[in-house]
Amino acid sequence: MKSRSRITVSQTQRLSLNTGLATAIRILRADAAGLSRYLEEQAAENPQLVLARQSLGEWLPRWRDALVRSSGRGQDPGGEAPEIEAAGPSLVAHAWAAVAAMRLQDRDARIAGTLIEALEPSGWLGASLAAIAKQSNASVAEVTAVLTQVQQRIDPPGLFAQSLADCLRLQAAEADELDAVVQGVLARLEWVAAGDLGRIARELGVSEQVVRQKIAVIRGFDPKPGTQFQACAAPIREPDLMARKGDAGWEISLNRSALPALSLAEKKGKGRAAAQALIRMVEGRNATLLTVGREILMRQAAALETGVGALEPMTMAEVAEAVGLHQSTISRVVAGAAVDTPKGTWWLRALFSQAISEDGLSAAALRDRLMRLVTQEDGTRPLSDAALAEALSAAGMPVARRTVAKYRGMLGLPPAHRRRKAGARRG
């Protein structure tokens, strides 16, 4: 019996993206650092695309804020009371766990405990070494020795710093970037904040370009590493947006120093159309990010004022409808974007939260309040889920005991009987 070949015809559907659309989507969901790298790659391949680093003006206020803080301990960059309830407990819990893992001798452990108690929400020490030595009943030399250990062995680098320059120095040393020029720049941060780079270059005996390169390295460090332990906090990075309060209210702007300026080469050549298209895509991404960011942050103005505990319920669908964009566009544009606020650097995505009660309580606000209750409790008498529910209800957050148990588990907090064993050292 002979076999015969058969020809069949079938029809399938497949969605494919053209190069331009795929590039546009990639640019839309990229954060500032990722987009900068992509643009540098494109400029290297296409001489028609010219990149120039933006001026220092956009990010200098962050240094000025930190410098003000270094001369007035206990105040946040806005000059308000310290954000202990927002950042302190989780930072302190992290530090206690790290010190326990170091297995220090009893005397050194007591000194380390006093250092932890002196931590500010920024991650800096809020007391002098002399004051810490007196409180620990130890010498300044002993405190200095323990301080060196915790600075070198507890992440993120920069914790337990005594000043802004010290914080950045610790991070530069960890990154193997602490050369003579970086040290010179760190010793002259007031001039960096004033934009007097020529004066720094003359004193250090190097070119202004070298100073700019070293400042670019320092920009990658976090002046307030302790704020990473806040809810919604983004890791060390240059933010995409800036939120500052002006005379007319909150002002949201692009952090233009996070991206290079784009332009076309003076002499026309091959690849010019592609360069023009890329510039338009980046401009579109920036405009969309700013529009979406403003809508999100205007809805969360209370959180900008008092911290993430004041986050309101908000969904991507609501933001999409308000700005006239598709929900998928909102999801893409906030995917890796962060905003620098007086309360720390936050992920935009983390500012979305579902309502968990009819009176508008957000899940994010509940998590924040629950975390603070647990980390501030008496370690010898930890609160049960029922007691936590009562405390939340008294604070205007009526929830059931099972809801408390659910969110406690989501936060990685053990039940009361297990917290009692480790609770004595909680901050």
Image (tube, grey):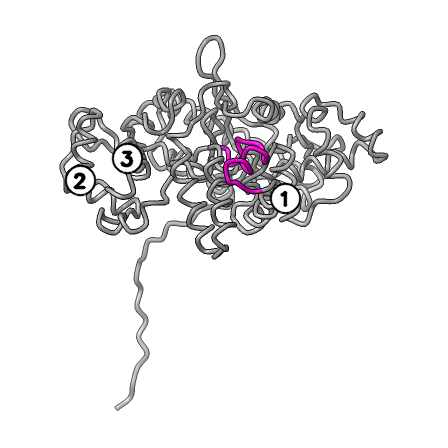
> Is the Cβ of the residue at disc 3 closer than 8 Å to that at disc 1?
no
Q: Is residue 134 magenta?
A: yes
In space, the residues marked 3 and 1 are separated at their CA atoms by 37 Å
* Among numbered discs 3 and 1, the one appearing first in the sequence: 1
> Residue 295's image quarter?
top left
Place of residue 388 in the rendered image (x, y in percent of width and height, measured from the top left) = 20, 36
Residue on which disc 3 sits: 373
User: Which mark is drawn over residue 403?
Assistant: 2
* Among numbered discs 2 and 1, the one appearing first in the sequence: 1
Q: How many marks?
A: 3
Span highlighted in magenta in the image: 122-138
Mark 2: which secondary structure? helix
Labels 2, 3: front one: 3
* Among numbered discs 2 and 3, the one appearing first in the sequence: 3
Amino acid under label 3?
Answer: Leu
205 shown above or below 72? below
Mark 1: which secondary structure? helix
Which residue, as the protein is rendered here, is positioned at the far front?
137
